[in-house]
């Protein structure tokens, strides 16, 4: 095969959440950096690339256009694509592990990628809060990663996460969103202080909360959300003498006037709002609603949903800055209360 050597070194991982055109881009850059592809070497056509790597033609074309924009590839009608610059140095190669995909995680990802820039290769994986898959992905990880950036949230098995994370050289480790007990040594972290954050947010809303008698937090029994949220919630309610309750199933929970509901899961917010509308409660008067994690829609729904949320974009930016600077700081990301009509 004409390009057999090319395909020995250029790959796309179907299990990676990194967009395939970026995987293609960084795989070609890796091959150039390793000396496997050199200036003036021809590379496969878009059709050949699509066929051999089992990717769409649009993906192949987008990857090549990205490399042309970077000044790495050129093309000549009748000749095809070829390497125009082999003086390439990718400054970092990052393994990025997220527990799940969501609107908020995308904000983190975008801030992270934009800050790192196009010369940093990122292999992006989602482990779906599954400790077994998390362990497998790290076990299969390449040794040449410059950094491992990990959001460590698990539904089950998380008590052993520190053992797996401790196998990563500390100078390569950055924990994101949450710190893990038992992870030792000097490493980077950009995190939320879950217990303190909810306590402070509710304290800021004390004036609005005063017209209600009961606070309820909707927190499913099997959840990847940190128990620190419950600690901060219970401490606030005890100190300010609110009747309070942890609700595991909002679909079955009796709802009465004078209660405030705090949700952490988006699906629970939908169920709650549907029930409140059907019961003809006036939200912000009879019932209060506070939702975790700011989104554009929460500014509009029911004249505005009060939110408590960290700065997800800042989280991604700060993690990238730790990589670029080589710092081993632990950075606590600010948490914000946004008051709206629902309270």
Image (cartoon, rainbow, N blue to C red):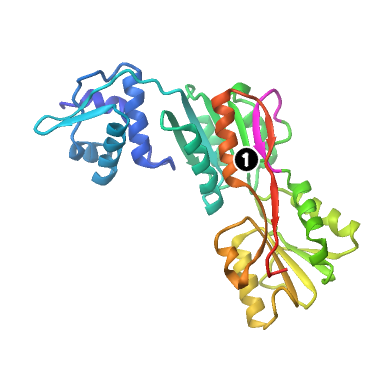
Q: Which residue is mark 1?
A: 152
- Quadrant of the image for the C terminus? bottom right
Instruction: Tell me residue 280's x, y (percent).
Output: 67, 83
Quarter of the image where one finds residue 62: top left
Tell me if residue 93 comes above or below residue 46 in the rendering. above
Q: Residue at x 38, y 41 (%)?
A: 14
Residue positioned 53% across, 30% down in the render = 139
Residue 265 percent across, percent down from the top left: 63, 59
Q: Position of residue 28 (x, y in %)?
A: 31, 28
Mark 1 Cα-neighbour bin, 10 Å: few <14, some 14–19, many ≥20: many
By secondary structure, the bulk of the magenta-drawn segment is best described as loop
Q: Is residue 254 visible?
A: no
Name of the residue lying farthest toward the left: 78
Q: Which residues are magenta?
A: 183-192
Q: Is residue 74 left or right of residue 32?
A: left
In what quadrant of the picture does the N terminus appear?
A: top left
Between 179 and 300, the residue placed more toward the observer is 300
Q: In screen coordinates, is 182 left or right of 317? A: right
Viewer-proximal residue among 223 and 305: 305
274 in magenta: no
Residue 87 visible somewhere in the drawing? yes
**Residue 242 in which image quadrant:** bottom right
Q: Is residue 77 above or below residue 4?
A: below
Give the percent coordinates (x, y) of residue 319: 58, 34
Q: Nearer the viewer, residue 236 or 337?
A: 337
- Up/down of 159 relative to 218, above or below: above
Secondary structure beneath dot 1 equals: loop
Instruction: Please give the name of the residue rendered at 31% of the width and 25% of the height, measured from the top-left corner.
Output: 9
Q: Going 59% across and 23% down the picture, which residue do you hit?
A: 326
Quadrant in the picture for residue 29: top left
């Amino acid at each position: 095969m004409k390009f057999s050597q090319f395909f020995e070194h250029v790959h796309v991982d179907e299990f990676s959440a990194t967009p395939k055109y970026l995987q293609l881009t960084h795989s070609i850059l890796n091959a150039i950096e390793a000396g496997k592809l050199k200036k003036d070497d021809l590379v496969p056509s878009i059709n050949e690339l699509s066929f051999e790597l089992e990717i769409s033609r649009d993906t192949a074309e987008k990857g090549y256009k990205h490399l042309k924009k970077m000044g790495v590839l050129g093309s000549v009608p009748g000749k095809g694509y070829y390497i125009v610059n082999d003086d390439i140095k990718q400054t970092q190669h990052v393994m990025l592990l997220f527990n799940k995909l969501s609107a908020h995680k995308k904000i983190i990802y975008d801030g992270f990628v934009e800050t790192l820039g196009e010369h940093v290769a990122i292999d992006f994986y989602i482990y779906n809060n599954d400790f077994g898959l998390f362990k497998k992905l790290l076990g299969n990880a390449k040794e040449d990663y410059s950094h491992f950036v990990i959001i460590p949230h698990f539904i089950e098995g998380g008590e052993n996460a520190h053992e797996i994370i401790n196998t990563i050289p500390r100078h390569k480790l950055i924990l994101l969103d949450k710190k893990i007990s038992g992870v030792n040594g000097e490493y980077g972290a950009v995190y939320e202080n879950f217990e303190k954050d909810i306590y402070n947010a509710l304290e800021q809303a004390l004036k609005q909360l005063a017209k209600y008698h009961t606070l309820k937090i909707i927190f499913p029994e099997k959840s990847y959300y940190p128990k620190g949220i419950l600690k901060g919630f219970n401490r606030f309610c005890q100190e300010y003498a609110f009747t309070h309750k942890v609700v595991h199933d909002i679909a079955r929970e009796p709802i009465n006037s004078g209660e405030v509901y705090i949700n952490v899961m988006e699906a629970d917010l939908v169920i709650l709002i549907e029930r409140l509308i059907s019961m003809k409660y006036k939200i912000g008067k009879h019932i209060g609603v506070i939702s975790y994690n700011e989104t554009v829609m929460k500014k509009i729904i029911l004249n505005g949903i009060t939110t408590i949320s960290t700065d997800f974009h800042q989280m991604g930016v700060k993690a990238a800055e730790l990589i670029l600077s080589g710092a081993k700081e632990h950075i606590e990301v600010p948490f914000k209360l946004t008051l709206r009509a629902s309270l």
